[in-house]
Amino acid sequence: MMRTIRQAAVIGSGIMGSGIAAQLANAGIPCLLVDLAPTGLTPEGEARGCTLQQPAVRNRLAISAIERLTKASPAPLYDRDFAGRITPGNLEDDLARIGEADWVIEAVIENLSVKKELFSKLEPHLRPGTIISTNTSGISVNAMAEGRSPEFRKHFLGTHFFNPPRYMQLLEIIPGESTDPGLVKELSAFCESRLGKTVVRAKDTPNFIANRIGTYGLLMTLKIMLEKGYTVEEVDAVTGPALGRPKSATFRTLDLVGLDTFLHVVNNVHANTADPDEKAAFAVPELIKSMVAQGRLGEKAGQGFYRKE
Ligand code: NAD
């Protein structure tokens, strides 16, 4: 029987979670968007007499993500009412509401133990048959499902959206070893017909298909830049608009992705390959390590290879 997706929940309101929620809302599907509740108040909040119990404070990360989305340009890619279909929340207070969703999408930081802990917290709140997927860039779907029940594993799979979801058509679907094949078929059809995606089925191998290839290209480009003494701007000039790729110059792309996420994605292949050549090629470059240590994470931090004007 064909499942109906009437409402969705997205966990993690960062770059990807917020963009995925907007895509679903744009397709007319109401979506709960949650992040962590803050553990402390900002000095401005304290000065205004805010408390950590107020919904506006507890849902702050998701609320500001929705505000950012409404300012995204070009706006016409979203239906004017899309933001009204996204409800902000936080993980701690909204577990029961997450359980009402027909499709729960995980888009928290790229870290296996954080994701596993989240799934163990979510599982008791899910109804039988709830679809649950991860937006991981390349962590093993089977490893994430370890310790979960057969019912959870049957409805669990990878749905890898690309950044930014509103422009990128590609969606990799990664079934786990226990995923119901009927669900894979139905969700693929749903993503193609309702979200306008081009779905590619990928195997559960480190970084799947597009990131395994794309990450290698980015690492090689960085290596050549450093070895040959080119500047970031010079490399972007020849890997971006001049090649007919207006949005995908190398270092602009890395800033958009987030250097912390890039570091985890590179490391994922390094840690999980047995091939010594591949291990060497996927060693995280010192430059990336030091930029992450300095908080130069890219656009989300206002500073990466480029500084936000
Ligand atoms: P991000 O850093 O922008 O956002 C992550 C969000 O998760 C943050 O808002 C953080 O507060 C929240 N979070 C962390 N732990 C949480 C928890 N336990 N519960 C609820 N929220 C939690 O990261 P992102 O770039 O949106 O990446 C999210 C996922 O999507 C990662 O798995 C990443 O690999 C994947 N992905 C990223 C890109 C990209 O280009 N950035 C592309 C495709 C897939």
Image: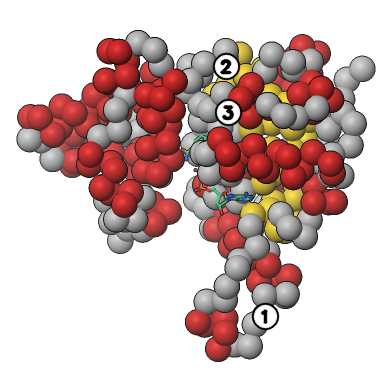
In this view, the mark in front (1 or 3): 1
Q: Is residue 184 left or right of residue 125?
A: left
Q: Quadrant of the C terminus?
A: bottom left
Marks 1/3: CA–CA distance: 37 Å
Residue 238 visible from this viewpoint: no
Classify mark 1: helix, strand or loop.
loop
| Residue at image coords 80%, 27% | 149
Q: Is residue 185 left or right of residue 100?
A: left
| Residue at image coords 54%, 58% | 68
Marks 2/1: CA–CA distance: 44 Å
| Foreground residue among 238 and 242 | 238
Q: Which mark is residue 204?
A: 2
Q: From the image, tell me which residue sits under label 1.
A: 51
Classify mark 3: helix, strand or loop.
strand
Q: Which mark is residue 160?
A: 3
| Foreground residue among 206 and 197 | 206
Disc 3 marks which amino acid?
His
Rendering coords of residue 37 (x, y %): 65, 63
Q: Residue furthest right?
A: 1
Disc 1 marks which amino acid?
Thr
| Residue at image coords 72%, 29% | 147
Rendering coords of residue 84 (x, y %): 74, 56
